[in-house]
Image (cartoon, rainbow, N blue to C red):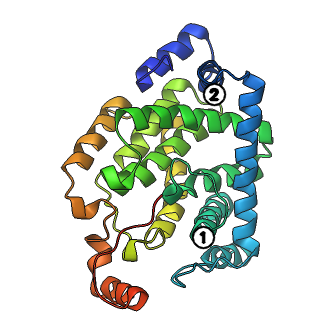
Amino acid sequence: MRFKTLQELIVLCQTEQLPIHRLMLKEQASESGRTEDEEFAKMSQYYTVMKDAVLRGLTKDTLSRSGLTGNDAKKVSVLLDEERSYLGSQAGRALAYALAVSEVNASMGRIVATPTAGSCGIIPGAFISSQEQYGWTDEHMVQGLFTAGALGYVIANRSFVSGAEGGCQAEIGSAIAMAAGALVELKGGTPEQTLHATGLALKNSLGLICDPVGGLVEIPCIVRNGFGAVTAFTAADMALAGIRSVIPSDEVIDVMLEVGTSMPERYRETAKGGLATTPTGKRIIKDLYGREKSVKPDKK
């Protein structure tokens, strides 16, 4: 890739007079040796998997093997159908869809890691609900995935996207930032607004620990995906309204690296701290494994 920072990405977009998704498609094809059409077709397949995961999460049994989580997306869907949701249609569906995909992941279904399995529901939740709201084509949504990919590429290379390395800020935070930035471009925002949305979203997630109960990607991971999808809309709206991230987005990414590196190990996907060590968390571990002890977390 010819860019390593978000600012370099913007300069390239300006120089070549391309939106972020077109530049990323061009860069990806150049790096892989495949044609742009081949890369676009591959990303289209990923979007189909996302839509399938949402449908499965809303219509099939998603009870996890542990029995701790599952079928909550359907509850939110009922709330929406009964018009009892505070969030309204689009954000409410984003919440339901994000939960659905995360529950499919926990029940051993097929998902797309965006950027990880632990944060797999945020982009699908925000994207698919927006597509339904505005009547956008699949092609338009796939363009948004390339935008999200460009943002995620910078975050992953300047910082990290793994909870084991940097806490949940690295997984959920990165996914929210990727979704928020992409939503801005999908709505016609400028590359600069896209960057501001990314920074605004990531700032709001700094310091979030990774504390999976029992080492499973279920509690609190699934509900954090639901919150994350809704938060992405907030950051996107701020940027589209002209609100700027006073701290440049690249600097926010650097802060996430500093915070994650400084974070005690027990708060980085070890199941040795946070919610995992509450009395209820310890009881769940004892029920699952027959004894109270720290466990190795699932691979994401």
In the rendered image of this protein, does residue 262 appear above or below residue 85? above
The x and y percentages for residue 173 are: 42, 50
Which dot, 1 or 2, sits closer to the camera?
Answer: 1
Give coordinates of residue 136: x percent, y percent. Answer: 78, 42
Residue drawn 49% across the image and 48% down it: 175
| Numbered disc total | 2
Residue 249 placement: quadrant: top left
Query: Could you say which is closer to the camera, residue 87 or residue 185?
Result: 185
Circle number at residue 34: none
Q: Mark 1 points at which residue?
A: 103
Q: How crowded is the residue under tag 2: few (<14 C-alpha within 10 Å), some, or many (20+)?
A: many
- Say which of 41 and 18 sits in front: 41
- In screen coordinates, is 223 left or right of 32? left
SS type, badge 2:
helix
According to the picture, the residue beneath numbered tag 2 turns out to be: 21
Say few, some or many: other residues with alpha carbon within 10 Å of mark 1 (under 14 / 14 to 19 / 20 or more): many
State the CA–CA distance, disc 1 to disc 2.
Answer: 29 Å
Q: In this view, does 231 lie to the left or right of 212?
A: right
**Which amino acid type is shown beneath numbered disc 1?**
Glu
